[in-house]
Image (cartoon, helix red, strand yellow):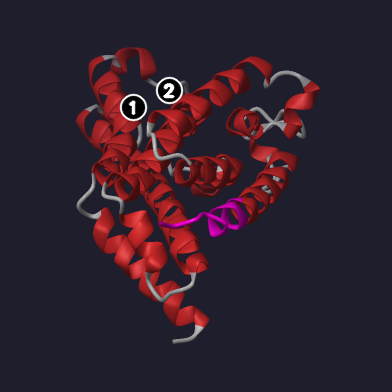
């Protein structure tokens, strides 16, 4: 088998295992959480949410859900779901089994990392679909909200989601490494939560541009623009986040490759 075949085989096996885990259903629940709250809110409090004349109700409807999810829920979700996915291998002692198979260690490590990325991306896509479904649903129930009379700014919505996704890549890279390195589920979870809480505290400082756990907030409250419509696709935090992801992924693999499997 060539390198690509090893990687595809490892990814396929990880996908099959993922379907039977709580991590998958946690991703579904995570995607539903905010849209479901907004569904109830708009159905029950629609009188307060009727847009002014000439105002597109979709703007506040979409951006408020992203700004509600990205700073707090998404980093916590990533810390938890990454720890859960890797914990499956530690709990069943299958890490040792995988590393004794006649396949490259890199295909095991990066195959599982690819699945983590795919699961997070799946959550973002499902969240986006639910936002539109909920928007048209509440608009159909309460015509006063004018959801059907206006067109959602899809480009802006996708841009905000893209910025949010790119901003958490650094967290994914480090949390995956920690989860692979420590058998105890509490250790990577605890470290991640401490780093995340620290990010909430320091994100307003200029130095937070170098702190990956603050990027989920900086991606939506950027240093490069005060106008949400003028946001670029790749702010500084996105570039730094990609850099951290590559760094942590390589360092994590080099560390795991040295593991003495007995």
Q: Residues within 10 Å of mark 1 (few under 14, many from 20)?
A: many
Task: Please name the residue shown 30% across and 67% down the image.
Answer: 13
* Rendering quarter of residue 236: top right
For the N terminus, the quadrant is bottom left
Name above or below for residue 250 compared with residue 174: below
Can residue 39 be seen by looking at this rendering?
Answer: yes
One can see residue 54 in this view = no
> Which mark, residue 183?
none
Q: Which mark is residue 145?
A: 1
**CB of mark 1 within 8 Å of CB of mark 2?**
yes
- Looking at the rendered structure, the secondary structure element under dot 2 is loop
Residue 155, placed above or below residue 83: below
From mark 1 to mark 2, how far is it between C-alphas? 6 Å
Local packing at callout 2 (Cα closer than 10 Å; few below 14, some 14-19, many 20+) is some
Q: Is residue 125 magenta?
A: no
Q: Dot 2 corresponds to which residue?
A: 51
**Residue 145: x, y in percent?**
33, 27
- When asked about the image quadrant of residue 229, the answer is top right
215 on left or right of 128: right
Above or below, comparing residue 190 to residue 93 in the picture: above
């Amino acid at each position: 088998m060539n390198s690509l075949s090893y990687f595809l085989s490892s990814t396929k096996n990880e996908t099959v295992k993922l379907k039977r885990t709580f991590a998958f259903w946690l991703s579904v629940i995570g995607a539903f959480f905010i849209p479901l709250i907004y569904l109830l809110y708009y159905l029950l409090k629609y009188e307060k949410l009727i847009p002014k004349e000439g105002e597109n109700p979709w703007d506040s409807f979409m951006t408020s859900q992203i700004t509600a999810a990205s700073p707090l829920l998404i980093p916590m979700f990533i810390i938890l779901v990454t720890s859960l996915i890797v914990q499956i291998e530690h709990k069943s002692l299958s890490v040792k089994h995988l590393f004794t198979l006649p396949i490259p260690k890199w295909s095991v490590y990066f195959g599982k990392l690819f699945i983590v990325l795919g699961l997070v991306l799946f959550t973002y896509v499902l969240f986006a679909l639910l936002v539109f479904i909920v928007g048209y649903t509440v608009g159909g129930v309460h015509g006063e909200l004018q959801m059907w009379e206006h067109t959602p700014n899809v480009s802006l919505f996708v841009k905000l989601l893209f910025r949010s996704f790119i901003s958490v890549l650094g967290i994914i890279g480090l949390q995956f490494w920690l989860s692979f390195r420590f058998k105890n589920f509490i250790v990577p979870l605890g470290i991640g939560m401490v780093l995340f809480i620290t990010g909430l505290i320091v994100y307003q400082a200029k130095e937070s541009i170098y702190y990956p756990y603050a990027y989920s907030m900086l991606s939506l409250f950027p240093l490069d623009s005060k106008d949400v419509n003028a946001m670029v696709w790749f702010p500084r935090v996105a570039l730094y986040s990609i850099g951290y992801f590559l760094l942590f992924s390589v360092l994590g693999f080099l560390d795991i490759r040295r593991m003495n499997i007995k």
